[in-house]
Amino acid sequence: MNNLLSVCMIVKDEEDTLDRCLKSIKDFADEIIIVDTGSTDATKDIAKKYTEHIYDFKWVNNFSTARNESIKYASGKWILVLDADEYISTEDIRQFRLFLEEEDARASIIYTISVISYVGESIRQANITEAPIPRLFPNHMGIQYHRPIHEQPIGGNGELLTSIPSPITVFHTGYTRDVIEKKDKLKRNELIFTELKKKNGFTAYDHFTIGNECAAKNDQKRALYYYERAFQKATESNPWRFTCAYEMWNIYLKLDRIQDAWDLNERFFGKYKNHPEYYCFQGVMFEQFSFINKAKQSFLTAFQLAEELSAKQERFFLVNPSFGSTIPLSRLAHLASLEHNNQDMIYYYTMILKGNPLEQATLIKLIERLSQHETTEQIISFLSKLYPEPTQRDLILLVNICTSLGVKELAVHYYNQLTDPEALRLESRLKFSILTHQPEVFMKLLNLVEQPVSASTLRLIAVGAIAWNSSEIMNYQDQLESDDPRLASVLQHVVQQNLTVDETKNHAFDFFHLLTDLFLLQQYEQFDQYVSTLKSPLLLNLLANFFYSKQLIDLSVGYYQTLLEEQELHAGSLLNLAYMHINDHLYDDGISFLEEAIRIEPGTKQSYLLLLLNCPDDIKKHRYRKQFFEQFSHYGKLPFLQELQ
């Protein structure tokens, strides 16, 4: 029987990720080809569990040479190239193989796969990006890799290949900062780029990939320099040009170059208005400038276009499917929350979860809102429509969320359906024991805490000590090794209630996180006690805004009233109060709060814009319009701001 698919990989010292990768593809690939370029760890031992096709190859500072070495051993009809820090969802294997079985292999065609990358400090603190990358192609047709870095396949006669999207999705974790630093990827890649420039100079794609390298180092200005050069040289045959344009647009926003972002969207993405990106990006910019109605219309258009296009063809987006789904819907939900429109907010969150029931951030917000307005039985009934036959993975997600939000009855309901409660993260189990008042269980779980202890676990231990006034937990806390000794010391002083006046002023953010944990885990009496002990203007502003963000308006107003009487309202608090009063059509009061916010922080554009869009006093509006354009002269040519002129 002929092999359908060969997965070809080059590896070196990949013991941390290789097992996950190979486990995900073992039932997908008919054969796995591993070319090892000099591993000194357990990489080859891990590979032997999954394949006998393991070959040693001396690294020559050239990725294409190593890639081509792996390809020559492949016997499958199709070749898929993967890296060790990538993996697929096993739930998609059947669909992927069906595509390969039905597709005709052509020597001039290469297929892009959707690579979803986690970019940031770590997986837990990462942003998610998606890009089409050519990685799937027919075997035995002369296709080879060229270029020493960010290698690209070319035809047997050196001709460029036509790219067509495939349904294959791969998840990539190699751009998180902890991985980059551990493997010293950037230094290795810089050496290769230096050699490449000396030999051949840079192509458009080289500039694009160097931009990606700089972005991975969070060097935004340098990344933009290379993205702009790549974009200038790109042609319509380059599938990466859409991602390049998006990265430029995104950096323009970060650098407050809004005019450049607007112009790029109009000039480039405006040519593709049948796709969602143009309207989604437009909505983001409208929202940044408090043009709420314009933003809502743009986001709605982005979503509707994606819906219409996806009914006709599989690929309905240019850069990322989330620009036609999750992002516009989540922004619409956020705008509904600003207007205290719970009905629309819940509708948009539900739409997101229908598309992806495991979208955790959305599920958190949905359950949080439902818990404020519905009974436990009503919420269970509602969620059963999203999860009609919940898997253990679904139940773990629901328990984690309900526990973190302090929705006790709901957390217990889903917890009781777990076949293996120990599959929950340790922090969730600690929270659940506090929420359900099980000090004995909490003490047993402390024996499982690994050291050095994270900041979030440290806070939970302090919450347990406070909740039960437990000297045993206090003593345990004293013995811990922490990865944040400063925080550990502060929490010890809090629990032992021997803080100095300076400490109450200097550690407001630490106290804020501790107090919100106490509140969410329903330790209300202790919360009130410690607020009165630890209170400072900064802490009270943080708590007021926390309750406002949760739409616990009565609680937030109590704190705002105290701060107002003491003349300690910060600009962010004043802005929230302005939104609150404008939503209730109390424009004069809202404008007064905005004027004070501008006085405190004249460099915050949202306060000016909200005032200019809602102020009924033409004389006052004229004065603040003049101030705004003097303060932010670089916004003067934005077309949607012309109505403020």
Image: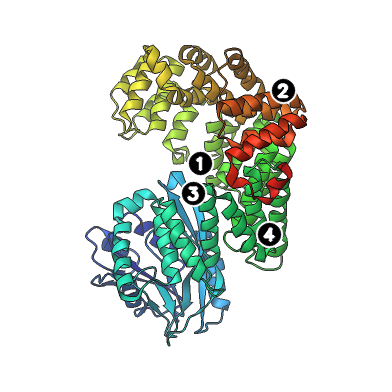
Tag 4 or tag 1, which sits nearer the N-term? Answer: 4
Cα gap from disc 1 to disc 3, whole angstroms: 32 Å
Residue 390 lies left or right of residue 300; in this view the side is left
What type is the residue that disc 4 sits on? Ala
Is residue 605 shown above or below 560?
below
**Number of other residues with Cα within 10 Å of mark 3, as a class: few under 14, some 14 to 19, many 20 or more:** few
Quadrant position of residue 455: top left
Tag 2 or tag 3, which sits nearer the N-term? Answer: 3
Cα gap from disc 1 to disc 2, whole angstroms: 55 Å
Is 526 or 277 nearer to us in this picture? 277
What type is the residue that disc 3 sits on? Asn
- Callout 2: SS: helix
Please state, as top left, top right, bottom left or bottom right, where the C terminus lies in the image. top right
Give percent across and percent down for residue 390. Answer: 60, 46
Quadrant position of residue 471: top left
- Callout 3: SS: strand
Give percent across and percent down for residue 511. Answer: 45, 22
Tell whether label 4 touches label 3 (CB within 8 Å): no
**Number of other residues with Cα within 10 Å of mark 1, as a class: few under 14, some 14 to 19, many 20 or more:** few
Residue 278 bears which disc, if any?
A: none
Residue 127 bears which disc, if any?
A: 3
Closest to the camera, between mark 3 and mark 2, is 2
Tell whether label 2 touches label 1 (CB within 8 Å): no
Q: Residue beneath label 4, please?
A: 306
